Image (tube, rainbow, N blue to C red):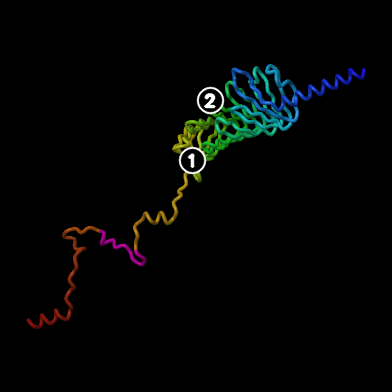
Amino acid sequence: MEKRSLRKKMHSKKLFSTILISLSMTFLASPLFAEKITFSANRMSGQAGNTNTTTTLSGNAYIKTETMEIQADEVELSGDNYRYIKASGSISGKNLEAHMDFNCDSLEYDRITKIALLKGNVKLDDKDNDVKAEAQIIEYNQDEEIAVLQVQIRLTQKDNVCSGSYAVYYKKSQLLELSGNAQVKQNEDVFRAQNISLNMETQDITLGGNVKGKVTDTKKPEEKAAESPEVPDGEIPDAAAERPEIPGNPGNEEKPEPPESGKKEESKNGE
């Protein structure tokens, strides 16, 4: 009996050691994918070497593929050759190919289609273009470089602050399409419409449907004064000098003074 229990303990230790070694290994998911997956965690359930089962990493879970890097409370690998990656709890990560950082509550990633679905307090930071986006749901297509944003959208770029119910961000062409109570603020200017298209490179904006807006004159008082003609202090512009002369107009000629009354009397007496 003692020998059997000793063998069981030795077998358990060997199995436990194998799992620990598997947790720290880097392996190829499949020769067809030719993509390395590195992962680590405090705990693991499932079999690290069997690519047809579900493997769950718990506690400070970390996983890295050639295009994605994810840290979370829990990460699940499933599908043929670990095609699907699911993460939950305090997620932060990077899309190494698109140069994007992200944070969210839950994530699903398909390694074949390269489509990532991020949910819950999503924050996306496009490092290449200094574009920061927030929403409750963001789906990013890595091959097409297109992000679809839904619910409580807020996107910032340069002086633009954009919001709406639905948006499509085209990373490659730097175009943003907003719909559903769409709004774009550019400093003090505000534009509202059902649909707004913004070219982030040229800053051209197109509005459609129930268009409203507010544009503020940002010129300073001294700039406005510079546009008007300068008049020296204490002088009043001579309106007569600016009026063109009209031939025969007595208004432009000096009138002779009338003779004094005393001189008229003297001329009469002399006669």
The label on residue 143 is 2
The label on residue 213 is 1
In the image, what residue type sits under mark 2?
A: Asp
Is-magenta flag for residue 253? no
Give how far across and how far down residue 83 sits, in percent: 63, 20
Q: Residues within 10 Å of mark 1 (few under 14, many from 20)?
A: few
Q: Position of 185 compared to 270: left or right? A: right
Q: Earlier in the sequence, mark 1 or mark 2?
A: 2
Q: Quadrant of residue 21?
A: top right
Residue 121 against residue 219 in the figure, above or below: above
Q: Residues within 10 Å of mark 2 (few under 14, many from 20)?
A: few
In the image, what residue type sits under mark 1?
A: Gly
How far apart are the two marked residues, 1 and 2, measured between alpha carbons?
A: 36 Å
User: Nearer the observer, disc 1 or disc 2?
Assistant: 2
Q: Position of 111 compared to 1: left or right? A: left
Is-magenta flag for residue 236? yes
Task: Return the residue nearer the eye: 1 or 233.
Answer: 1
Q: Position of 136 compared to 172: left or right? A: right
Task: Please identify the dominant SS of the magenta region.
Answer: loop
Q: Which residues are magenta?
A: 232-242
Residue at 68% x, 18% y is 51
Q: Quadrant of residue 156?
A: top right
